[in-house]
Image (tube, coloured by chain):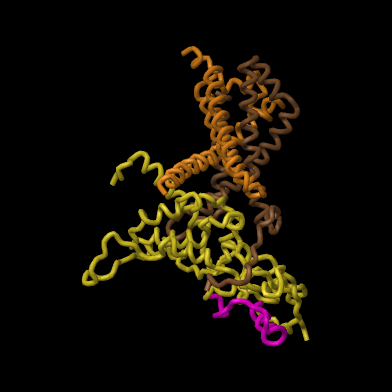
């Protein structure tokens, strides 16, 4: 019967503000936009290295000591930690682990990976800075 | 059909790298931001001595490797994901353009990063 | 007597090109569902109201609609959840509207068929050899994905499908995964190119709303993610071992 359509169908476009409609969508958008700060910090770091290569090491260090960079780093750290937390929760959702008869829950993956992240962070500091 | 199949296969691999970048950004980037952007300029542990984060690059090869993996992985992941986040807030028509710009930034960024690190690390610059 | 106010988005293309609201007051009982209200309206207030329904008990998947902004089965949405408020009923989002609450399902149906939802064997064994045996563990790997009732709520909840109609989508991919994970199926070579094409699983960015709205407990987000992992490992394998590497 599709060839005989005399009346037009109503096509509704998704409006750009679709993500404000419910709490899950807002959390999703916040989670995705953490990527902006992850990328920006990387670019700022590469920029800092370019200052060192073209100038001197103190040019790089002065960029790091700049209050704007410190403020940006705080914000970037907050967003990166939000990325880590939501990433670990996602891991728990899409790679559930079976131990005997029980299956792991996402919040368990979150806690386990968060602890692992703290251990890895300490290892990095110990291996690279403290030794 | 074969053309789109090759593109899809490439996209599958890029997605794999993006996922790896996500792991890197989750496990390694926080400590990197803390060391470089917060601990050093504010004199917090472990930088309350005389060392500074440039040591990560010039001091050991392991440190240089850490910086490369963390920054390259985070850059790839961040740009890849931000591209799709932009298309979702109404910029879908610009998708091809955003992808092109994004991959360009990733490529240039990683090449520059590798180059700078090789130049700055005295052990490698001497080679 | 208690009443509830139902506000329906109508679309009558034979009368005019624009959709419009219409409000109805229905008598309220605390065991009523939205479908009961729609049926009361059609029987007593406005016979022109058009909508799909069938089993009225949440197994046929016909009665999907947007109830106060959330894709739900109207037969499974109790009025008492919305007590004291006006409930707004819209046709399922992301689908073209034919009339009132009836949407065009053709794109969805095409996608379900596209992924070849049947057991594909390289070689059929003759019936004399008996049935294909499957253990409880093997069944568990795909069982939840076989519960889909094709109600399309997941497509309505998915903003990626809303932005790009070419996206294969949650239900179709979950169904494909149901067959990929079925131990009796040998059709990966056939299905992988379909799910792993550009508008297949790769468009998904893990919004996850599909799994939230599913009335039967299917987790399409999980199916899509697992299919992505299969796709990535398959792509790497096909590059490292181009001749098949069996």
Where residue A7 sits: x, y (%)?
63, 71
Q: Is residue C150 above or below residue B104?
A: below
Q: Colour of chain B?
A: orange
Which chain shows up in brown? A
The spot of residue C241 in percent (x, y) is 33, 41
Residue in view at x 45 percent, y 41 percent: B10
Q: Residue at x 67, y 16 (%)?
A: A58
Place of residue B110 in the rendered image (x, y in percent of width and height, measured from the top left): 54, 29
Numbered range of the magenta stretch: C34-59
Q: Quadrant of residue C41?
A: bottom right
Q: Report the front residue among C226 and C238.
A: C238
Question: Up-down: is A67 above or below A120?
Answer: above
- At a point 70% along the width and 76% down the height, the residue shown is C80
Colour in which chain C is drawn: yellow
C39 versus A3 height, above or below: below
Residue in the image at 46% along x and 50% along y: C197
Give C20 or B69, whichever is nearer the viewer: C20
Task: Check residue C96 for magenta coloring.
Answer: no
Q: Position of residue C96 (x, y in %)?
A: 61, 65
Q: Residue furthest left?
A: C128
Residue found farthest to the top:
B126
| Residue C58 part of the magenta-drawn span | yes
Evaluate whether residue A126 shows in this view: no
């Amino acid at each position: 019967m599709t060839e005989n359509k005399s009346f037009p169908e109503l096509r509704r476009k998704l409006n750009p503000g679709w993500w404000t409609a419910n709490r899950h969508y807002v959390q999703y958008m916040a989670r995705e936009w953490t990527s902006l700060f992850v990328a920006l910090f990387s670019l700022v770091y590469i920029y800092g290295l370019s200052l060192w290569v073209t100038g001197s090491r103190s040019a790089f260090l002065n960029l790091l000591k700049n209050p704007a960079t410190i403020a940006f780093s705080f914000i970037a750290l907050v967003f990166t930690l939000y990325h880590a937390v939501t990433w670990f929760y996602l891991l728990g959702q899409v790679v559930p682990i079976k131990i005997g008869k029980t299956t792991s829950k996402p919040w368990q993956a979150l806690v386990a990976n968060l602890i692992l992240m703290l251990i890895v962070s300490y290892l990095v500091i110990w291996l690279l800075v403290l030794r | 059909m074969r053309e789109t199949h090759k593109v899809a296969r490439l996209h599958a691999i890029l997605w794999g790298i993006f996922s790896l970048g996500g792991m890197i950004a989750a496990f390694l980037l926080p400590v990197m931001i803390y060391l470089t952007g917060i601990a050093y300029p504010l004199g917090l542990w472990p930088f309350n001595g005389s060392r500074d984060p440039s040591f990560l690059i010039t001091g050991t090869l392991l440190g240089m490797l850490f910086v490369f993996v963390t920054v390259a992985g985070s850059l790839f992941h961040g740009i890849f994901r931000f591209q799709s986040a932009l298309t979702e807030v109404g910029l879908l028509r610009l998708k091809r353009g955003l992808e092109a710009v994004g991959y360009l930034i990733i490529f240039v960024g990683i090449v520059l990063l590798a180059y700078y690190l090789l130049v700055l690390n005295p052990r490698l610059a001497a080679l | 007597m208690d009443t509830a106010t139902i506000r329906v988005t109508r679309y009558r293309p034979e009368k005019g090109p624009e959709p419009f609201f219409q409000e109805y007051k229905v008598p309220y009982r605390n065991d009523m569902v939205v479908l009961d209200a729609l049926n009361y309206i059609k029987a007593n207030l406005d016979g022109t109201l058009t909508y799909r329904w069938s089993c009225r008990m949440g197994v046929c998947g016909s009665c999907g609609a947007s109830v106060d902004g959330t894709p739900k089965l109207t037969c499974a949405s109790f009025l008492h959840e919305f007590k004291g408020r006006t409930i707004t009923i819209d046709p399922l989002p992301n689908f073209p509207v034919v009339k009132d609450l009836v949407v065009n399902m053709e794109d969805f149906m095409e996608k379900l068929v596209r992924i070849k939802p049947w057991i594909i064997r390289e070689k059929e064994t003759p019936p004399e050899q008996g049935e294909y045996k499957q253990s409880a563990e093997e069944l568990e790997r795909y069982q939840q994905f076989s519960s889909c009732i094709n109600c399309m709520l997941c497509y309505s909840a998915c903003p990626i499908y809303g932005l790009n109609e070419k996206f294969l989508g949650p239900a179709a991919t979950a169904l494909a995964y149901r067959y990929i994970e079925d131990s009796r199926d040998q059709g990966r070579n056939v299905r992988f190119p379909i799910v792993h094409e550009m508008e297949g699983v790769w468009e998904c960015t893990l919004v996850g709303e599909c799994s939230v709205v599913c009335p039967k407990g299917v987790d399409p987000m999980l199916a899509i993610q697992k299919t992505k992992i299969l796709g990535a490992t398959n792509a790497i394998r096909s590059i490292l071992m181009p001749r098949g590497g069996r």
